Image (cartoon, rainbow, N blue to C red):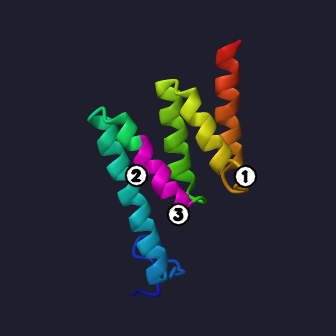
Amino acid sequence: MPEQCFFKKENVNLIEFSSSQITKTNKSEDILHTADSYIEHSQFETALNYMRNHLEHEQDNIELTIKLISLYKALRNRNEFDKAYERFSSNGVTVRYWNDGRQFFSDKQT
């Protein structure tokens, strides 16, 4: 790797990723891509189940949480959202997104 940036001729600090970080990123992208594919083909229940199952193992996955909550909102599926909220909203990393979803459905009732 070059010690200097080609464009600015400044020192470059290289970032080294461990193989576990790369694998986790690729896996997360694969999960989101698969969920998008289900959604694109109007397989909404399959997408919801798929994302919930993966969220069981990756509860800190913010992108997956946001996509799941967004689909609940788009489908106006409050009952299933409430079940997922009870299961996942205690996670400190993603709690704000779950609370935003809760607010969305509360606003829709009034």
Q: Is residue 29 left or right of residue 11?
A: left
- The amino acid sitting under disc 3 is His
In x, y percent, where is residue 35? 37, 47
Work out whether mark 1 precedes mark 3 in sequence or the reverse, and give the earlier one: 3
Foreground of the two, 104 or 55? 55
Image-based side of 34 in relation to 4, left or right: left
Alpha carbon separation for disc pair 1 and 2: 22 Å
The residue beneath circle 2 is 32
Q: Residue at x 71, y 38 (%)?
A: 99
Q: Position of residue 88 (x, y in %)?
A: 64, 50
* Tag 1–tag 3 contact (CB < 8 Å): no
Tell me which corner region of the image, top left, top right, bottom left or bottom right, holds residue 44. Answer: top left
**Image x and y of residue 4, in percent:** 46, 83
How crowded is the residue under tag 3: few (<14 C-alpha within 10 Å), some, or many (20+)?
few
Residue 58: image quadrant is bottom right
Residue drawn 47% across the image and 34% down it:
71
Q: Which residue is mark 3?
A: 57
Q: Residue at x 72, y 52 (%)?
A: 90
Which comes sooner in the sequence, label 1 or label 2? Answer: 2
Q: Which mark is residue 90?
A: 1
Badge 1 marks a residue whose secondary structure is: loop
